[in-house]
Amino acid sequence: MSILTAPENYELINTCNKCGFCQANCSVYKEVLNEAYATRGRLRLIKAVADGQLERTPLYEKIINSCLMCEECSKNCPSGVQGHLLIQLARQDLVMKKGLSLIKKIPIGTVLPNNRLRKLSFNSARLLKKIIDPLPSLQSYRGIDLKSIPIADEDFLSGYQPEEVGLGKKGSLKIGFFVGCLMNHTMPQVAKSIVRLLAAHDCEVVVPAEQRCCGTPAYTYGHSAISEEVALSNINLFNSLGVDKIVTGCASCGKMLKYYSRIFEKNAEIEEAANDFAGRVLDLSQLLIDVLKIDLQKFALPLKGKITYHDPCHLVRGQDISSQPRQIISGVFGEQFVEMPTANKCCGAAGMFQGFYPEEATAITNKKVASIQKSGADYVVTGCPACLLRIQGSLRLNNMPQKVVHLAQLLDPDSAANIV
């Protein structure tokens, strides 16, 4: 007996009508050209495991874990099959039957859920980076540009000064700011921009230092116990603050925070609190456009050149957010904004995917770089720290001059002046 054979799950696995629409939209399949790596193929393998016709072999595990979780298949399936959720279910089944591999267990099960260990890990990585940065032979690893990963000397949650970034100011709207691990440790300047921006628009911003990882890595790779633990911790923390909204500048965090309601939908004790929490979560662009309705004409920023936008998977498909970031960019910069081809295609980061599947990840990222080049843009804007680092690194490795910036940096005069 496994979760795959539970009646409600087994029925969903069998809803695929094998039409193959997912092939046309799967970035991984387009690189490997192997049916097993398209959602249709993966679901057939999952069904074979559920039926006892296939063992959970290392090859099966490799194929199931090779999914980007970009949700292209789910959004384009004429039968409405939520392929990414079924693949996550298969990963959960693998964890329950075989456990996580050590290389995943350390970051997912040990480091990321623990604030102290995560801080220690990033501090150690920063010291290591200072050693390897001058070495030409260690500029990149498995297609990841190590030199362009800016591990901060002091993370945002440890080092921010309330008076410096506008915290403590009373406003008409009380906002809880969920920073996220990557933004906290690699780009605290973006976090400061977000707080300054909100404070400038009559918001009281609350940043609880005890906030934990959103749970995306654990959930994505099937470790439901860890994802539920950190989710409950964040729910209790933010629900105790009396905030009107919870905002984040990370696409992956935002998707996961909103998903807390689904995680606990069958838990009567937690469901109401989870729904209350998830119902208040907004991406930064949503808050600015849909709630605060900021006056974009008031921004006069010194950015010259063309600007394009990359849609993070966890924003455009994970949260159905596409128009708000574009409204902001075009509203502030007018004709400087240009669309790139296939702006909503995955950049190839996909969390740990880029490390475990470097050839496929590099090929996918190179397509994104080509799209940027075709747009003629000088700047690439996005709302996901992981996408930002991946695209910036690939541009550097390809000797391309474009800069990648977070949406918040465009609207914060202090940051905008520094990215010119």
Image: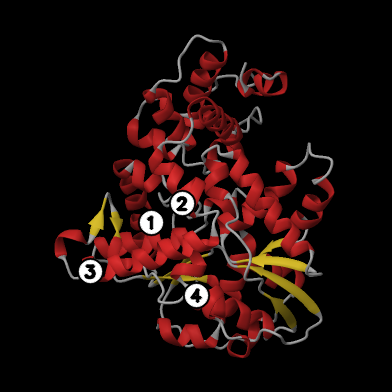
Residue at 60% in and 60% down: 212
**Image spot of residue 311 (x, y percent):** 52, 57
Residue kind at label 3, given as amino acid type: Ile
Q: Secondary structure at mark 4?
A: helix
Q: Which mark is residue 342?
A: 2
| Residue 338 left/right relative to 236 | left
**Image spot of residue 96 (x, y percent):** 55, 28
Q: Gap between marks 4 and 3, in whole Å?
A: 22 Å
| Residue highlighted by disc 1 | 371
Q: Nearer the viewer, mark 2 or mark 3?
A: 3
Q: Secondary structure at mark 3?
A: helix
Q: Quadrant of residue 13?
A: top right
Residue kind at label 2, given as amino acid type: Thr
Residue at 45% in and 50% down: 107
Residue kind at label 4, given as amino acid type: Pro
Residue at 53% in and 23% down: 43
Residue kind at label 1, given as amino acid type: Ser
Label located before the other in sequence (4 or 3): 3
**Image spot of residue 309 (x, y percent):** 49, 64
Q: Nearer the viewer, mark 4 or mark 1?
A: 4
Q: Secondary structure at mark 2?
A: loop
